[in-house]
Amino acid sequence: TACNALQKFPGKIYVPLIADYDLTAAHKACQTFKAYIADAKAEKALEELHSSCMDVVKAAKEHHDDDKTQAQISVATIWAESMVPKVKEGVQVVVGLMLALRNFAALLPAAMSLAPGLLRGATAVK
């Protein structure tokens, strides 16, 4: 995931042609994102992700105003805005799978005991 990739970077990073970035806020956002995912709060996780992406774009806009950088920023903005729905769908799939597996594990014992009970009842009636 993006958070796993981000963990490989130090607190500050230099992006050529753009600026030095302090990634401390991004690291904190990833921790919050992972906590929301663990608690199955997909909407809050997506809000955190979107907010973090927009913070990066805002920081880039504050550092540079020339045309080349503005083009890079607009590409980054378009990319960030196009990624949010994809990430949202991915988060929903992961949360759905987690809930499905948890419910499957809860219902499996009851499902396994149903067939023997039905067979005993059928043989008793016969």
Image (tube, rainbow, N blue to C red):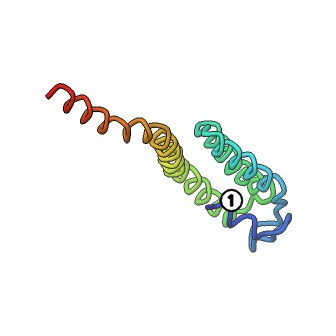
Quadrant containing the C terminus is top left
Residue visible at 58% across and 40% down in the picture: 42
Q: Which residue is mark 1?
A: 3
Q: Three-letter amino acid code at disc 1?
A: Cys
Which image quarter: residue 3? bottom right
Say above or below: 108 vs 18: above
Residue, x 72% and y 52% (percent of image)? 30
Whether residue 85 sits left or right of residue 30 in the image: it is left
x then y, percent, for residue 19: 80, 66
Q: Position of residue 60 (x, y in %)?
A: 75, 57
120 or 35: nearer the eye?
A: 120
Q: Position of residue 41 (x, y in %)?
A: 62, 37
Asked whether 18 or 10 is in front, the reply is 10
Q: Residue at x 78, y 69 (%)?
A: 9
**Left or right: 123 in relation to 7:** left
- Farthest bottom residue? 16
